[in-house]
Image (cartoon, rainbow, N blue to C red):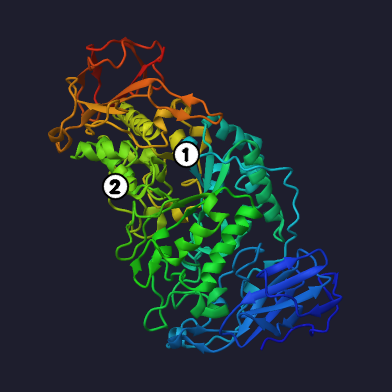
Amino acid sequence: MITTKVSTDAKTVTGWSISGIYPGKAFPLGATYDGKGVNFSIYSENAEEVELCLFENLDSEIEVLSVKLKEREHHVWHVYIDGMKPGQLYGYRVYGPYDPPNGHRFNSNKLLFDPYAKAISGTIEWHDAVFGYKVGDPDGDLSFSTTNSAPYMPRSVVIDPQFNWENDEAPKIPYDKSVIYELHIKEFTELNADIPEVLRGTYAGLAHAASIDYLKKLGITAVELMPVHHFVADRHLIERGLTNFWGYNTIGFFAPDARYSSGGLKGEQVTEFKNMVKALHKAGIEVILDVVYNHTAEGNHLGPTLSFKGIDNQIYYRLAEDKRYYMDYTGTGNTLDANLPGVLRLIMDSLRYWITEMHIDGFRFDLAATLARELHDVNRLSAFFDIIYQDPLISQVKLIAEPWDVGEGGYQVGKFPPGWAEWNGKYRDCMRDYWRGADSVLAEFAERFTGSADLYKSDYRFPTASINFITAHDGFTLSDLVSYNDKHNEANGENNMDGESYNRSWNCGAEGPTDDEAINNLRAQQKRNLLTTLMLSQGVPMLRAGDETGQTKNGNNNTYCQDNEISWINWQKTDKDLLEFARQLIRWRRDHPIFCRRRWFKGSLIKEVKVKDIDWFLPDGSEMTEQNWNSGFAKSLAVYLNGSHLNITGAKGEVINDDNFYIIFNADAEPLQYKLPVKKFGDKWIEVINTIRNGLTPDGHIFKPGDTITAEGRSVILLQNRRK
């Protein structure tokens, strides 16, 4: 047992006057300030004793007061300390058997984070002491460490839940009106000269008027923040002078990470985060969090003991048959077991907290297939989905799945239940293949462009279940996608062995930067092709922050460890033409509901439909046939979108229709002549977008049915037939 500076009969801690120590309540879990004192509660089924450790300040290496939690109900240990106030620093020591072969890893020498901590004071100082075993011992994790880890561990922090939201209201933007913008807070703000230097890289930096003005002008409706739950930077990265930049290594599921705070570390980060959400909401922008409930930062059997391992290893993790080891469906060393009641409660409590207390509008679940696993199989009707479905609060926000993990059978695109949207990896792969000129079946292009009915329609889902994207944080930027055939991850120090090797990219004739004007022009055109396809497709478009500026990461497709100029958006090098083109595309999508339908198209090969919503055509103006759809070499096609019969019911009950559109896609290297169909689709067609140019067609070329249009090699042309 660790010797403390002061016994449990002390009357002051960190300047507070403690009136008394009482049994308290089991719920809510965590540290809860009620205006008079703080209730502490922690869940552990197999612990023999739990000790609350209170610290005087951030520099204290040993607790100033230790309190044994004598009350226990429903496996929850609890105590109430009268007179304690927000800002108090604390942690836990949990006693029990250290028996790895049977799944137990209790070690009271290790200071532990509260799993329900609403704030965490800082980052871990890596030292052998934070491991439950003796690092370097021949017996490995079967050995036992008696070194106190407190000097190297941050503290959990008691927060004041009071905050003036000033009548904050969620934008509640429907999926069909949404344009999602995936961003990393530091990557987006660190080099923005319009943001005060002290605020760059922080929540306050994203809330700054310069950031919000940019987002509004771009036209996005939601920011999808890469992980902000408190995370751990891996030891092996820190020792190599790198870090965990992306944050997919969570240890605190209720705490906004202190690294993105411009203020102090004793709860100020919570207030700053709330102010950020409030500012974005005021601008009409939703906030979606990328959340990592599939694993924790404690790694495998050789990982550190930071929280869950030391509180009760068996009730949090999915263990192998030999309970010394962990099932790893995430590639990180461990997997949280969402089938266990304590883990389910933790996840649901965390989600509700971020919705109710932090006003978050939705979540993107990292490696969501892991959460669906029962035993070794992925089962979409697992307990996790059942609880989400019946929860009146969580089920009403945006729920987005990354529908895969690294385990067997983990690729589950199209198999999540109604109510969920999914990152559509098949859309990404298809569109990349089409525009790089790979042999592909046009039928798949049509499926992906129209919302992927083959994946979602049979399950009573809609096109908005498909989150369409060309690029994301994991992989090439848009500029690198058209500039590199191969990844160039040497800066990561892993001999270029990390990251995806099959990128479906094309360098347009030279690897990396080049002075060849023709290649650079082609790359610019390819970027416009990909962005145009994304914004005109049915489903919900997601744009990776920086793609609209022409950001490059020099061919590094796995910048998870690069907190430096490789990752940060260099606003001084913004491609202004590309940025303006992206703004125009997003505005065009917003103004025309035909590109963001809530229901499936009726038409093409459906013979019983009297009025078709959609029709596909060959270059000669004839309709596509079954044989044409299955051609593996065709690279060109055109589509007619009938907006005249859209018949959308507006907010006030009015019927909304749209203009008609004709889109020509030519992924072939050579120009093609397209004949406009002579069917009565309208007598005047105006060219509004042609990707051989940087923006909207300035003089609006006018065509009539039967006219021939030249579609230059690798281009998209959008024609508009305006309603009279």
From the viewer's perspective, is the residue at label 2 or at label 1 nearer?
Answer: 1
Mark 2 to mark 1 CA distance (whole Å) = 20 Å
Q: Secondary structure at mark 1?
A: loop
Q: Residue at x 60, y 40 (%)?
A: 171
The image quadrant where one finds the C terminus is: top left
Using the image, determine if residue 280 lies above or below residue 117: above
**Residue at numbered disc 2:** 486
Q: Nearer the viewer, residue 88 or 639?
A: 639
Total number of numbered discs in the rendering = 2
Residue 342 found in image quarter? bottom right
Which amino acid, by three-letter code, is at mark 2? Asp
Residue 20 found in image quarter? bottom right
Using the image, determine if residue 683 lies above or below residue 320: above
Q: Residue at x 48, y 73 (%)?
A: 340
Which amino acid, by three-letter code, is at mark 1? Gly
Q: Is residue 305 left or right of 719 when viewed as pictured?
A: right
**Residue at numbered disc 1:** 546
- On the question of residue 360 being in view, the answer is yes
Query: Are there few (<14), some (14-19), or many (20+) residues within 10 Å of tag 1?
Result: many
Q: Secondary structure at mark 2?
A: loop
Q: Residue at x 47, y 74 (%)?
A: 317
Q: Picture coordinates of residue 51 (x, y %)? A: 68, 82
Using the image, determine if residue 432 lies above or below residue 423: above
Q: Picture coordinates of residue 405 (x, y %)? A: 37, 61
Labelled pair 2, 1 in contact (Cβ < 8 Å): no
- On the question of residue 243 being in view, the answer is no
Q: Residue at x 48, y 29 (%)?
A: 590
Using the image, determine if residue 637 lies above or below residue 27: above
The image quadrant where one finds the N terminus is: bottom right
